[in-house]
Image (tube, grey):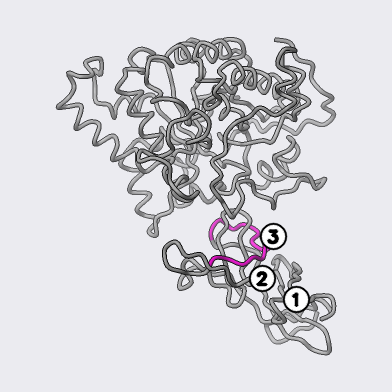
Amino acid sequence: MVANREKTKVEVAKVSELPPGQSKIITVGRREVGVYNVGGQYRAVLNICPHELAPVCKGKVVGTRVPSKPNEYKWGRDGEILQCPWHGWEFDLKDGKSLHEPHKCHLKTYEIQVEQETVFLIV
Amino acid sequence: MTVSAPETESKPAIQKAIRCVDCDVHQSGPDRDAMLKHVPKAWKDRFQSGGHVGHLGLHNPVGVTRQDCKDRSGKHGACSPIGLNDCLMEPYGIDRVILTGGIYSQGGIHPDADWADILCRAYNDALLETWIPQDDRMHMAIAVTTRDAELGAAEVRRLGAHPKVAGAIISSACTAPLGQRQFHPLYAACSEMGLPLMMHPGAEGCGVSAAPTAAGFPTRYIEWHTGIIQVFQAHLTSMVCEGVFQKFPKLKVVLVEGGISWIVPLMWRLDKNWKALRSTVPWLDRKPSEVIRDHVYLTTQPIEEPDNHEHLVQLFNMFDAKKMLLFASDFPHWDGDTPQFALRGFDADFKHHVMAQNAIDLFGLE
């Protein structure tokens, strides 16, 4: 753990240990952060759902039915959506925003840095 | 009834001051073997082959049972008293629970009334034998059938005096509006035994139950789940208008998981209609809303969540919510609430009544 002004840099895993589709929950002090490899992009979100404070990172990473006309069903976003294990609220791992009210309901996100084959979480 | 208690090496300590009672906990037990023992010989083969009915096939992508709750040994949190402690009571400060299980659905929707009764009785005996002795903080609602109210009444009389039996639970999914006289023997028994009658949804539209919405069968789970309140509205209107509470003045009814906010406009509408149509229900000697206030309780889950939380506070001021609401988590189901979430924004006195005192008084908890 290296102090970086007020932020902290925490080692998450080696790049080889976190291939696409995989995730890991990291504890930093009293916080838990879920780190996800979404198709080669790393994403990090606080393990708290803004609804009832559920451990959202214990939910499944899923695809979903994307917006469509009535009686049309289009599957998309495979592996990009985090679904809360309690009430099923869906969050876009790309930016933490909910699919139902992205303008006001979202997960707290964190920066990820990759240096020399190691994934770091910046909190 | 005699039951042999299992080994109970280390029962959890029981909190004398009850801060929170959870009135709707769907434990996943007793297991089938524990129940089989209580199934009469002539029914055992049927039990072993399954024999439950009821699934509309509507899709809930979240899954009805939460998968994130594991106890200290990695088992699902609803599968043992220890699991309920680890995943529900300890983390959320719940001091007493009313176990509601799930077999009550069969009691309301199975075509065969005798079999519905057998399932309820085996469940009740097995839960009393295997779960209740393990944790003094757990009480149960005995499941009873409405398919033949005399059978349901007999079960209420058989077990209603047991100190751990807090209430009797029936399915809101059933064959007819619950105020009608074919159900009255059950209410007579509950009234006689001082046992609150709890009504729970879940099997609407399945088995021999009526359609799950007033307009018929909806296409999707979201419509079905939203429409459950219609069934509760119909049952409550029926019970009030049929004079159930005049006939059984000691009867208390708990509407579990049936929504809350609809109660206000329903009482307004019923009062208005009563003023004009009173002569069609001449036994209703006072406003229907007063009858409801004196006899009916509603559990909090799933709590309604308007964008402006103040609107919910206002709505709770429009009826005697402090007296009529009971906290319930619905653990471990997908639409559950924590007490911290359900009662946020309400004052301490209100919270105390809804989280503990109303349930203590209604169910006679200690």
Q: Position of residue B266 (x, y in %)?
A: 29, 37
Question: Within 10 angstroms of label 1, few (less than 14), some, or many (20 or more) residues?
Answer: some
Question: Within 10 angstroms of label 3, few (less than 14), some, or many (20 or more) residues?
Answer: many
Task: Tell me which residue sits at (36%, 17%) in the image.
Answer: B244
Horizontal side, residue B12 vs residue A81: left or right = right
Q: Inspect the image, locate mark 3, and give the three-letter code of the amino acid beneath it.
A: Lys
Q: Which residues are magenta?
A: A51-65
Observer-nearest of B115 and A116: B115
Question: Within 10 angstroms of label 2, few (less than 14), some, or many (20 or more) residues?
Answer: many
SS assignment at label 1: loop
Of the image marks 3 and 2, the number of the one nearer the N terminus: 3
Task: Tell me which residue sits at (63%, 44%) in the image.
Answer: B332
Task: Tell me which residue sits at (79%, 20%) in the image.
Answer: B5
Q: Position of residue B338 (x, y in %)?
A: 57, 47
Q: Inspect the image, locate mark 1, and give the three-letter code of the amino acid beneath it.
A: Pro
Return the chain for callout 3. Answer: A
Q: Which residue is mark 2?
A: A79
The vertical placement of A83 against B24, above or below, is below
Observer-nearest of B197 and B309: B197
